[in-house]
Amino acid sequence: MFYIKHNTDNFTIIDCNLSDETADRIIGELKTASKGKGIVRFICTHPDQDHFGGIELLDDTMPIQNFYVVKNQALKDTETESFKRYCELRDGDKAFNIFKGCSRKWMNLKDDTRETSGLEILWPDTNNEDFQEALAACDAGESYNNTSAVIRYKLANGASIMWLGDLETDFMERIADHIKLEKTTILFAAHHGRDSGKIPNSWLEKLDPQIIVIGEAPSRHLNYYTGYKKITQNRAGDITMECVGDKVHFYVSNPNYTHDELDGEEMSTFLNYIGSITVETEYTL
């Protein structure tokens, strides 16, 4: 689960996996962080339980008014309460279907009311045959990973961050020439950092990330991206990224986690500061 407290009047939540034990704390934080924001959106990357788990707890407490979702008719053998609520939101009047290059106020269009969020949807291309095959498998209840949206957030004159959902390696290789890939500061590894979602070199060479975040999954399943700076959530816990100008300052929930490859700038906005990076010049390939 991620959230972006934009410098504009926007607030974005990407995916969730809440439980009865964590919901009160996390939703309380979301309420505090989003206070005063005029637009709050929830983006669900794909219909897997661990990407919408507990969405009914969030929706009941902090009603979702803007639900961004890749159009699908996913089936499940067992329909959890979370999946039922996901379907209600997906098929309801609060849903907005996202796809490559889509536009929406105030996601990437501004007006006199407010500025944009800095978000861009890079995938899916709904006309792409590989995506159509993945969507058919999703709608048949067979596999959901390769319907994941690819989302990029760019801070004006600052960091850029990319989410890949649970895309699988072979699928990413097949679509490498059909998606816009440009230098990105922070990259969330696909499929929680598992080997099954290893980001191929055809992507990494263009993205050239300064930091790769490896999500929570059993260590034996993870790929640790040799040669790249990375933060592992298994050890770091929750990560807060403070983006200020051309800097990103990192804080984690585990007070014992350290990172020797980050620059020390003695920041103290949040607890457990572990270091910073300076955003490298971006370029387009």
Image (cartoon, grey):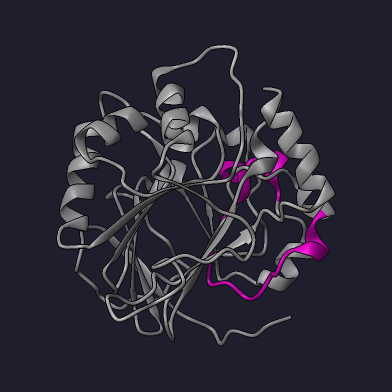
Residue located at (44% from left, 31% from top): 86
Q: Residue 268 at x, y = what percent?
A: 19, 69
In this rendered view, identify the residue nearer to me: 81 or 113: 113
Which image quadrant for residue 201? bottom right
Q: Residue 129 at x, y = what percent?
A: 84, 48
Q: Quadrant of the C terminus?
A: bottom right
Residue located at (62% from left, 42% from top): 166
Left or right of residue 249, residue 177 in this image? right
Membership of 258 in magenta stretch: no
Residue located at (39% from left, 44% from top): 94
Q: Residue 238 at x, y = what percent?
A: 34, 48
Q: Residue furthest top?
A: 78
Q: Residue furthest front?
A: 93
Left or right of residue 64, residue 78 in this image? right
Which image quadrant for residue 196? top right
Residue located at (25% from left, 75% from top): 266
Which image quadrant for residue 272? bottom left
Numbered range of the magenta stretch: 175-198
